Amino acid sequence: MVRFGIIGTNFITERLLEDVKDFEDFQLTAVYSRTVENAEEFAKRFGAEETYVNIEEMAKSNNVDAVYIASPNSLHAHQAITVMEQGKHVLCEKPLASNTIEVEAMVEVAKKNNVLLMEAMKTTFLPNFLSIQKNLHKIGKVRRYVGTFCKYSSRYDAYKEGKVLNAFNPKFSNGSLMDLGVYCIYPMLLLFGPPQSIQANAVLLETGVDGEGSIIFSYDNMEAVVMHSKISTSFSPSEIQGEYGSILIDNISDPEHVEIRYKDGSIEDITQIPSSLSMYYEVEEFIKLITENSKESSINSHYHSLTTIRIVEEARKQAGILYPADTQL
């Protein structure tokens, strides 16, 4: 049994707790929120005994083994470092932090305190992503990867009316690339490794965050294209194009249908029906690693997190996206 504290009382946390509610090795014991009211209401709803408005106090709790962080991106590094310095394991939402220096600091603290730090990139543990890896050889030499995650934000209408919510506020290191584009980049790294070079463009909003953008990645004998947006919706699948056929992925962040279309016109459905809800699998990996006394996932590894944030930071630099967190180092 691993006793969890959570930081962030939002829909992402609610979804995780719903997805793991039947997981016997997961126990929610503590809730942190900026206000007493939110912490107490959330704790009551999900059965936690302890509530906090001070992260340092939660970090010292003897009833917390690990902390799940789902706060705004700009807060991840400080919060994770605070709890890891008290010997707590950390499962932190993607992106792991605002920039490379912050992620490097988080990894250093995790190693120094002999605790597990894992990025909560759920995609890489899902049955359908594993199916893509297993069947990739069938399409022959890969020539192009196209990752697309374009989804009109529920908060964009408010933005257009003059109300800047967290999703479009650079103070919180948000924007299309950080919130959605990483879902395309992280799986690409697991499938094909790091690129040789990148070219990035973005459409910037008045606040300075990116509303949408695209990146071209150069590899030996192939290329990759990532398209992301929070101000428009795409209905096109992501795709891996090989010389013998292509793998079509309906939703790169949470694939539910995956098929191979071969060049002779035949179609092979390689979809796997999951036995659990999507966020269950990352928690299962995290708890398994704690049980085994492992301090790093071989899948959502420190290397993959560091490589992803370096790519994201370079793309932001090329597109002119700067966060307050970048100037406070």
Image (cartoon, rainbow, N blue to C red):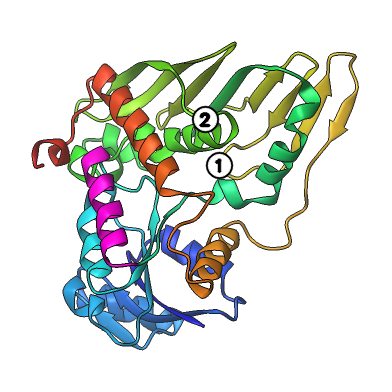
Q: Is residue 35 left or right of residue 46?
A: left
Q: Residue at x 28, y 19 (%)?
A: 319
In the rendered image, the quadrant that contains the C terminus is top left
Q: Residue at x 32, y 64 (%)?
A: 8
Magenta run includes residue 109 = yes
x, y percentage for residue 299? 54, 49
Determine which residue is flagged by label 2.
193
> Which structural element holds mark 2?
loop
Location of residue 9 (image quadrant): bottom left
Amino acid under disc 1: Ser
Magenta run includes residue 329 = no
What's the magenta bit mostly, secondary-structure-wise? helix
Residues packed near mark 2 inside 10 Å, few (<14), some (14 to 19) or many (20 plus): few
- Judge whether 277 appears above or below 316 on screen: below
Closer to the camera in the image, 306 or 128: 306
Closer to the camera in the image, 47 or 78: 78
x, y percentage for residue 276? 68, 63
Check if mark 1's residue and mark 2's residue have beta carbons within 8 Å.
no
x, y percentage for residue 35? 20, 72
* Mark number, residue 117: none
Find the magenta span and give its range: 100-114
Closer to the camera in the image, 221 or 32: 221
Q: Residue at x 59, y 11 (%)?
A: 221
Q: Is residue 123 left or right of residue 170?
A: right
Comparing marks 1 and 2, which lies closer to the viewer? Answer: 2
Determine which residue is flagged by label 1.
253
Q: Looking at this rendering, what residue extends furthest in the left direction?
A: 328
> Which structural element holds mark 1?
loop
Location of residue 312 (image quadrant): top left
Please say whether residue 10 is visible from this viewpoint. Answer: yes
- Judge whether 10 appears above or below 208 on screen: below
